[in-house]
Image (spheres, rainbow, N blue to C red):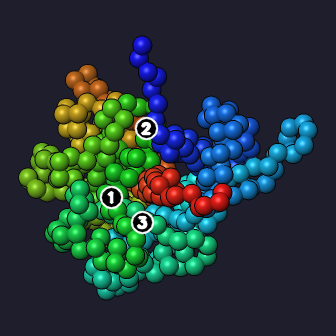
Amino acid sequence: MSRPLAGPQTLLRSINGRAILETLASDGPQTRTDLMGATGLSRTAVTQVLRMLESAGAVAPDGVDRSSRGPAAGKVGLHPHLGFAAAVHVDHRAAHVVLVDATGAVRAEAHGDFPRKDDNETRVAHIAALIDRCNATVAGPLHLALIGVPGIVTADGSIRNDQGPDGGAFRSALTDRLGCPVRIENDVNLAALAELTAGAGAELSSFSLLLLDEGLGAGTVIDGALHRGFSGVAGEVMYLPQTPLPVGAPVVNDQVVADLALINGRDQNAPLEEHLDAAAAGDEAAMQMALELGKRLALVAGSIGLVLDPEAFILSGQAAHPVLVDVIHKVAEEYSARLPLRFVVSSFGPEAPLVGAVGEAASALRATLFARVLTTPEKPGR
């Protein structure tokens, strides 16, 4: 007769502890009865685990439940001073910082343009100052930071952008300045993760997100997982060859917009959104610009479709402007008999990279905190 499976009590408490911590993180403060229903644990097991978690400083009393009959039941929630993670979106002009707790709730926020002096040291100091400003308004330590940046990001956190590879200098400098682990991620990949978890991509098995801002980038999800590529290059679609553009010429970026404005007799210094708004208002020259840009974006999608065949394309950033969406649909319709392409609009617009950074930072924070709590020995006498 085989013996039943068994394991050490410490392992069992760790598994049960994680189940309770995850429930409190996702659903907020709970009564013991709530936790029993959510985890399937007995009342005795819930009580024992909560005692362990309270001893480790992970949970604390958090109000009472007066909605049920009988005596009010006490609730327990994650300890408010467990600490935070910083989610940061960096573009070429500014940094946007959000502090989140383990539940994913935003606890502080700051935004600021970069100083005119644009070098690595200045950017690190600027981002760190914004994080310090946020951290001064909350009680609890900063455990990690997740930074979304434009450019190619390798597995070790190195960045390759218009200035070339940085060899991990940005990540190392920010880690030293903040005194906590720092993770670097491509901003378009973060936008794709935002759509995957809570946006237009949540019901899609695969999709490519096309984000148009100062340039064009793609974030691709295949079978529910983000595809970064071997060296982080996946999604750098701005230089996909297109006739009659010369090989190596950008499909669309700020300079292309300025060139198209010059050709069509419009202000070269005006931002793309201004041209698109003018097209929506009936300006013929602006509409000619929109037609050219929409055609280029549709052809980029077609190139991706021939290789990856995603279920849909999500248009984000300026690509989600109604004028461009309409043009892209019309161009795609011309090719639908040979290559059907489906387009949907982003759920988050320009904020998609920051939304993705917040979600990833909160997830990483939970993993860090819960691992630390569940490997901390109980205090004697409890």
- Please name the amino acid that badge 1 sits on: Glu
Frontmost of labels 1 and 3 is: 3
Report the residue that reaches farthest toward the left: 247
377 displayed left or right of 331: right
- Please name the amino acid that badge 2 sits on: Gly
User: CA–CA distance between discs 1 and 3?
Assistant: 11 Å
Q: What element carries label 3?
A: strand
Instruction: Characterize the local packing of mark 3: few (<14), some (14-19) or many (20 or more) Cα atoms within 10 angstroms.
Output: many
Report whether residue 327 is seen. Answer: no
The front one of 14 and 350 is 14
* Residue behind mark 2: 201
Q: Pointer 1 and pointer 3: residues touching (CB < 8 Å)?
A: no
185 displayed left or right of 248: right
66 displayed left or right of 130: right
* Residue behind mark 1: 185
The front one of 292 and 179 is 179
Above or below, comparing residue 89 to residue 19 in the picture: below
Q: In which quarter of the image is the N terminus?
A: top left
Above or below, comparing residue 290 to residue 1 in the picture: below
Frontmost of labels 3 and 2 is: 3
Residue drawn 17% across and 48% down? Answer: 230
Report whether residue 258 is seen. Answer: yes
Report the residue that reaches farthest toward the top: 1
Report the residue that reaches farthest toward the front: 1
Q: Pointer 1 and pointer 2: residues touching (CB < 8 Å)?
A: no
User: CA–CA distance between discs 3 and 2?
Assistant: 25 Å
Residue drawn 40% across and 47% down? Answer: 193
Residue drawn 54% across and 75% down? Answer: 135
Q: What element carries label 2?
A: loop
Q: Residue 118: x, y in percent?
A: 30, 81
